[in-house]
Amino acid sequence: MLDSSSSPSNNEAASLNQPTQEDLVVEGFSPLIKKYVPSMISEFAEFLAQRAQVKVSQESPWVLSINLQDNLLHRLHSQLLPLLNNQINTLSLSLITSDLWKDLGKNIQLILQTQSQLKHTIDQIKPIITAVCRGTNSPESRMNDHHLQGLKHCRIDRLKQRFNEGIMDPISQISLQGQNLFKQIQLTPKDLNLKFGECVDYKEHLTVQVHRASEQIESTIQLIKGSELDLVQESWESDLGQIDMFISEIICAINLPTHLPKEGDHQTPSRLVHAPTIELARLSIPMVKLSKLFFAKLLKCGMNQRRFRSYSEMCLDQIGTVTQSIRFVAQELDTLISRLFCADLGHTDTATARRELIECTNSLKSRVESALLLVLLYYLPLVPDTEGFPVQSYYQNWFITWNTQFNLSIREFQVAVESFDNTTF
């Protein structure tokens, strides 16, 4: 595989029936591949381990260990994860670069060294993940974690999942690709080795997996460093984009069509036809826009741009209510638009149309107000005032004004619904 000038030890190894450098590289990738265990398997193993443990009181030990676990997380995001990212990039560059074929012996030594370093770093990270996440799966602890500060389940659950699926999976894929590459080198005549430098398939796959791993490592660092409100809002941007789409859809729907739909036309309509439903759609725009405004005010461009304490006194259920509220609101708005089109097409009678539209807006109101209450009780008190400007008072007044306008928009829509009649369509 290698000529004598590039790696003389390989000929000696072959004559003595000892592993060559390529053999060592192939073997070195095996433990890295095996370090990834799919979540379903690891969670089942964890469940069995917990069942075998003797139940002990966790109250005092858990409280005392919070500072230690914070220190472990600090080491994780400030040292080990950045180190892991550097090692992944070093390994991938060693495998991707065309220089690999110019001085294969030298690069093999770098790969072997990086394999060892990568394994050592992972072996340091895994016990930290285990220690931080230990004892967090009982129903009682999950529903009563308000005292755990930055170690609540909303963070710990994501940390476990992100490390295993987001980081270890691509590391396993990179290692598998590297192992397969060196297996091919072992089977390829030495005069064809250089042609591997022109192969793009494995390069593209490696590049994708390295990018995925680096992205997930950075995401995990932010997960550890970020505030509780950052975690709550992790997926809000995409949901806000969906609400924007609903606003555009409603505006499009109230523009009068150039022709009425033909009988038997089963295509989904993009515009409303009848004046009563067009009026309802017009009246829905303020409450849809106000729904979006509430969540936008909480994002980094609003209240969350001010750095405050990284955790509240909320428990897992309450955090989940705020986290999921925007998604449920988006679902209610989607349902509302569907109900308007059904009423416009006469697919529902007047009584049913009224009831469904009222139920939909009541549910929308409930979702938003549940989140608002928790924000006012738990997050607003964490916002620091600045000298000469009472920030908390500003946001409190803003939310009061917003809530008044939101309730007014709901009421105006529901009053119009109560007089809605589609029997004349």
Image: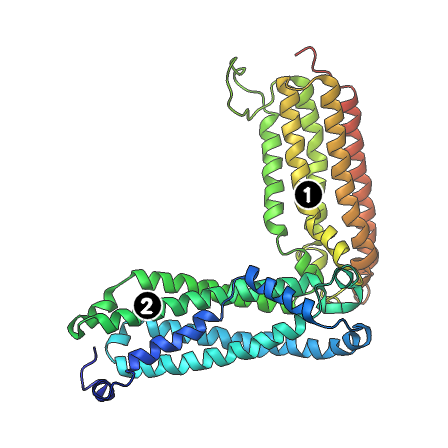
**Scheme of colours in the image:** rainbow
Outermost residue toward the top in this view: 424
Q: Amino acid at mark 2?
A: Asn
**Image quarter hosting the N terminus:** bottom left
Of marks 1 and 2, the one in the foreground? 2
Residue 150 at least partly seen: yes
Which secondary structure, mark 1? helix
Whole-percent x, y for residue 83 in the image: 51, 78
Residue tagged by mark 2?
Answer: 180
The Cα atoms of the two marked residues, 1 and 2, are separated by 46 Å
Q: Position of residue 342 (x, y in %)?
A: 63, 23
Looking at the image, is mark 1 or mark 2 earlier in the sequence? 2
Q: Is residue 223 shown to the viewer in this render?
A: no
Camera-side residue of 118 and 36: 36
Q: Residue at x 18, y 82 (%)?
A: 3
- On the image, the x and y values in percent for residue 345 come to 61, 18
**Mark 2 crowdedness (10 Å alpha carbons): few <14, some 14-19, many ≥20:** some
Q: Is residue 370 above or below residue 36?
A: above
* Nearest to the observer: residue 180 or residue 352: 180
In the image, which disc is placed on residue 328? 1
As helix, strand or loop, the secondary structure at mark 2 comes to helix
Q: Residue, x 75% and y 33% (percent of image)? A: 361
Amino acid, disc 1: Phe
95 vs 5, left or right, is: right
Q: Is residue 54 above or below residue 249?
A: below
In the image: residue 24, left or right of residue 370: left
Question: Which of the 4 image quadrants contains residue 386?
Answer: bottom right
> Between residues 405 and 139, which one lies in front from this camera angle?
139
